[in-house]
Amino acid sequence: MFDIIINPVSSSGKSLDKLKLVESTLSQKGIAYTVHMSNYAGHTTEIIKELNQKEHSEVIIMGGDGTFSEALTGITNFDTITLGYIPCGTGNDYARASKLSTDTLTALDVILKNNPNYADYIEINGNRRCINCAGAGMDVDVLVRYASLKKFKGKIRYYVALLDTLLHLKFHKVRFTIDDEVTEKSVFLITIANGTCIGGGMPISPLSDPFDGYFNLVYVNEIPKRQVLPLLLKFLKGKHLSNPATVTLKAKEILVEVLDTGKIEIDGEVLSEKILDCKLISGKLRLYQ
């Protein structure tokens, strides 16, 4: 018996077409299921909390990274729930990092093989959970601009927001603490990465592995503005780690504080908070993979 939670507006409604394939396959195999529509922000979290009251739940999430992140946030008892993920979003960055197929029937077949693995996630500020990336800096400025661009769709919308942000580029002051060592920097961006990509395939942390028991800290120090575009081109190919301005390291805990007017983001959600108190959590989240 599967509970299916679907975001009906993911990928401009194409998720509903994928649902038809899933329902047809499950029916042909004689597998029982119930469909739950996620109709507003935070609804997936509410649905998961209700389902997690059962003795055991096998839940298939159909949506983008944001829908999956909401599902993670709603779990109250990790011992009695297993998640499957059929990516239906525009970017599908977490699916990419986890090597989950974006082909609907292939992703469903993985779930039906019933071979879950423990996936990592990041606990933030003691009350939030992050499945892919959190951070501050340029990428957050892009998300703020992205939200205002209503006439563009999909990846084009992201790249227009990126271009506009670069044209009005500003660096951000942050303080981060690892193992009681405190560092203040002016940065282009700083990312705590469980996954590998942001923005629908930009490999900001190509060395990350969401199953290895660590997250990767990646930050780029302030650089002359004339160097930003060449560095960004390297970002698109995942080759920015070789740039002297880029620093990356593995960790299990970190505290990041934004010291200026910048904002933070958690799995693509922009927040006005200034602190990311991050702790890597392993061995709790069961995911069909």
Image: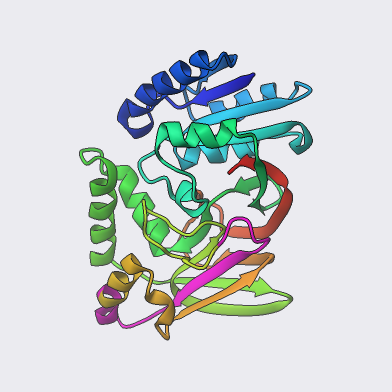
Judge whether residue 188 can be spotted in this image. Answer: yes
Residue 39 position within the rendered picture, expressed as x and y whole percent measured from the top left = 47, 22
Image vertical order of residue 173 relative to residue 112, above or below: below
Residue 190 position within the rendered picture, expressed as x and y whole percent measured from the top left = 49, 68
Judge whether residue 268 can be spotted in this image. Answer: no
The one of 274 and 196 positioned closer to us in this rendering = 196
| Residue 289: quarter of image | top right
Q: Which residue occupies 32% across, 48% down? A: 146
Q: Which residue occupies 50% across, 48% down? A: 267
| Residue 180: quarter of image | bottom right
Residue 235 position within the rendered picture, expressed as x and y whole percent measured from the top left = 35, 69
| Residue 172: quarter of image | bottom left
Residue 269 position within the rendered picture, expressed as x and y whole percent measured from the top left = 48, 46
Please say which color scheme the image uses.
Answer: rainbow
The one of 27 and 208 positioned closer to us in this rendering = 27
Image vertical order of residue 77 relative to residue 255, above or below: above
Q: Is residue 133 magenta?
A: no
Q: Which residues are magenta?
A: 209-229
Q: Is residue 225 magenta?
A: yes
Q: Which residue occupies 31% across, 51% down? A: 145
The outermost residue toward the bottom is: 244
Q: Which residue occupies 75% across, 25% down? A: 56
The one of 98 and 225 positioned closer to us in this rendering = 98
